[in-house]
Amino acid sequence: MLKALRPLAALIEGFIDRIGGLTAWIALVMIGLVATNVVLRYSFSFGSVWAQELEWHLLAALILLGMSHALQRGENVRVDLFYARYSPTTKRVVDVVSALLLIAVSLGFIWLSLGYVEQSRSISEASADPGGIPLRWLVKALIPLGYGLLVLQQFAQLLRLLDAPLTDKESAHV
């Protein structure tokens, strides 16, 4: 990677790391909400459609915002059975091709979801259930946002990957 692009990769990864911190808080809120809903339902026979829908919306936020952070931390799914046996050069080729493929697929999801979000916004889509959450388009907007973050993180990793040396010892840190 050109030296000029190193700060860009670091900036993107710092931003994604902050998003990861946000998702940790979302997870805590979700756990508290689910626990509260369970106690209210089974102890007091009280349930709220709004609270149940909020659980699903928080889960969507957790997944869609958290996937870029998972990629950054290397917690994504990869077939290590084969990958571990590859030479550093082959690993680099696999990583570059995988990165480009993930970026292309993510851009496709963004493009497809924008119309979906706009349609929801234009008709002021809300929950079909009485007492449900209005403004359904806000949770749907997490789809292009989440995949946009995934593109950013993969781009930062691609920059680092292209700059990484090829020795066995150094390629382990890519």
Image (tube, rainbow, N blue to C red):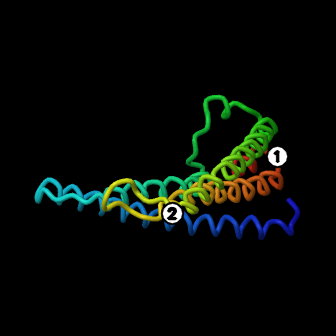
Q: Secondary structure at mark 1?
A: loop
Q: x, y percentage for residue 79?
A: 61, 33
Q: Secondary structure at mark 2?
A: loop
88 vs 173, left or right, is right
Foreground: 22 or 112?
112
Quarter of the figure with residue 153: bottom right
Foreground: 86 or 134?
134
Which residue matches tag 2? 124
Residue 51 in view in this figure: no
Q: Residue furthest front?
A: 123
Question: Tag 2: residue type?
Answer: Ser
47 vs 16, left or right, is left
Residue 111 in view in this figure: yes
Q: x, y percentage for residue 78?
A: 61, 38
Image: 86 above or below 120: above
Q: Residues within 10 Å of mark 1 (few under 14, many from 20)?
A: some
Image: 126 above or below 90: below
The residue depicted at 37 percent of the width and 60 percent of the height is 54
Q: x, y percentage for residue 140?
A: 54, 56
The residue depicted at 58 percent of the width and 54 percent of the height is 143
The residue depicted at 80 percent of the width and 53 percent of the height is 164
Q: x, y percentage for residue 147?
A: 63, 54
Foreground: 128 or 162?
128
42 vs 128, left or right, is left
Tell me whether circle 2 and circle 1 mark residues in contact (CB < 8 Å). no
Question: Tag 1: residue type?
Answer: Leu
Q: Which circle marks residue 166 in the picture?
A: 1
Whole-angstrom CA distance, mark 2 to mark 1, is 53 Å
The residue depicted at 70 percent of the width and 55 percent of the height is 151
Foreground: 7 or 57?
57
Tag in front: 2 or 1: 2
